[in-house]
Image (spheres, rainbow, N blue to C red):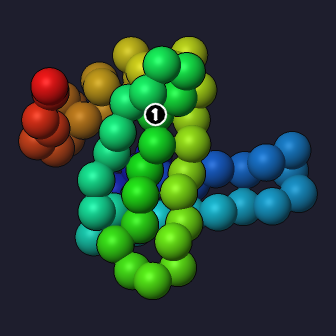
Amino acid sequence: MDDGGIEINKCNAQIVRLAWDNIAFVRKFKESICFFAKDNSRIVLAVTTEYEQEIMKYFDDNGIDIIRV
């Protein structure tokens, strides 16, 4: 995660990136946190909940509002 968005590098082979303005919503599941794209690409970036604290800290540090249900 950086100012431009979130990026996942799978085994140094494939890099997938979503810009913050292209994220429709983020949803936490039992074993993953998923970032869903707004556009028609239907990209969903899934991150294990192992990174939950890091993700939430990034949101808090950068003033990214989240809805917790």
Residue shown at 86% from the left, 44% from the top: 11
- Quadrant, the C terminus: top left
Q: Is residue 2 left or right of residue 31?
A: left
| The quarter of the displayed image where residue 53 is located | top left
Give the camera-side residue of 3 and 19: 19
Query: Which percent across, then down, holds residue 63?
Result: 12, 41
Q: Is residue 56 left or right of residue 49?
A: left
Q: How many marks?
A: 1
Q: Is residue 67 left or right of residue 40?
A: left
Give the camera-side residue of 33 and 69: 69
Residue shown at 46% from the left, 43% from the top: 34
Residue shown at 35% from the left, 39% from the top: 27
Residue shown at 33% from the left, 45% from the top: 26
| The quarter of the displayed image where residue 50 is located | top right
Q: Is residue 55 left or right of residue 30?
A: left
Task: Check disc 1: other Cα within 10 Å, few if <14, some if 14-19, many if 20+.
Answer: many
Can residue 51 be seen in the rendering of this structure? no
Q: Amino acid at mark 1?
A: Ile
Query: Which percent across, then down, holds residue 24?
Result: 28, 63
Query: Which percent across, then down, holds residue 59?
Result: 24, 35
Q: Which residue is mark 1?
A: 33
Can residue 50 be seen in the rendering of this structure? yes
The answer to whether 23 is drawn above or below residue 49 in the figure is below
The answer to whether 50 is drawn above or below residue 37 in the figure is above
Q: What is the secondary structure assignment of the residue under circle 1?
A: strand
The answer to whether 4 is drawn above or below residue 48 in the figure is below
Query: Which percent across, then down, holds residue 9?
Result: 72, 50
